[in-house]
């Protein structure tokens, strides 16, 4: 667990690759590089499964605390729930992590494709499903750079 000063932010970037719309909802980890470069931000990987392998390829991988492959080995999300309870914020693509963090009442920023899953609607920054979840939507299909820029802009003032 990330300890010490700084904003502790859990991140998750990829859903289940077998899901038919995974290419739209998941984003490559490299898009999180601007977050890793922000002073005072401490990233914690909440990624499980295939996407976790992307971490080793990042030149900034040391900026992310990785709980490793033993995380939730039993599949019950108990370890992840405990970690989320110790974070200041969760930033995730549209995966099970968004629902877990939202259901736990954790502050959650959800990164959404231009045309997201039906439950998130087509506009707005709020969702009726989870009170502390904020939606960050692509303005143009496939443009995660703009989404992450807005996330970084908002993160600068988060918790102040």
Image (cartoon, rainbow, N blue to C red):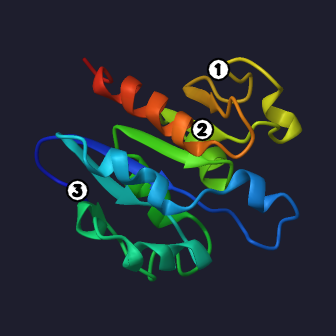
Real-space Cα distance between discs 3 and 2? 21 Å
Real-space Cα distance between discs 1 and 2? 9 Å
- 103 relative position to 32: left or right: right
Name the mark on residue 2.
3
Picture layout, residue 119 above or below residue 76: above
Q: Secondary structure at mark 1?
A: loop
Q: Nearer the viewer, mark 3 or mark 2?
A: 2
The residue closer to the viewer here, 5 or 85, is: 5
Q: Residue at x 84, y 35 (%)?
A: 119
Q: Secondary structure at mark 3?
A: loop
**Position of residue 153 measured from the top left corner of the image (x, y, whole percent):** 38, 25
Instruction: Residue 124: tell me if it is visible.
Output: yes
Q: Quadrant of the N terminus?
A: bottom left
Tell me whether circle 3 and circle 1 mark residues in contact (CB < 8 Å).
no
Picture layout, residue 139 above or below residue 34: above
Residue 41 quadrant: top left
Q: Residue at x 41, y 73 (%)?
A: 55
Tell me whether circle 3 and circle 2 mark residues in contact (CB < 8 Å).
no
Q: Quadrant of the C terminus?
A: top left
Q: Residue at x 11, y 48 (%)?
A: 4
Residue matched to label 1: 125
Residue matched to label 2: 110
Q: Secondary structure at mark 2?
A: strand
Picture layout, residue 89 above or below residue 52: above
Residue 132 quadrant: top right
**Farthest left residue in view:** 4
């Amino acid at each position: 667990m990330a300890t010490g000063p700084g904003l502790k932010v859990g991140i998750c970037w990829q859903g289940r690759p077998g899901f038919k719309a995974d290419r739209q909802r998941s984003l490559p980890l490299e898009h999180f590089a601007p977050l890793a470069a922000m002073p005072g931000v401490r990233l914690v990987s909440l990624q499980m499964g295939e996407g976790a392998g992307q971490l080793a390829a990042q030149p900034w991988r040391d900026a992310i605390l990785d709980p490793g492959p033993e995380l939730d080995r039993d599949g019950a999300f108990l370890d992840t729930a405990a970690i989320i309870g110790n974070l200041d914020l969760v930033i995730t693509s549209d995966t099970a992590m968004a629902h877990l963090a939202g259901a736990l009442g954790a502050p959650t920023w959800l990164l959404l494709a231009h045309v997201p899953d039906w439950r998130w609607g087509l506009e707005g920054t709020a969702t009726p499903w989870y009170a502390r979840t904020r939606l960050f939507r692509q303005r143009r299909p496939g443009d995660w750079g703009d989404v992450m820029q807005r996330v970084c802009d908002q993160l600068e003032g988060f918790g102040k």
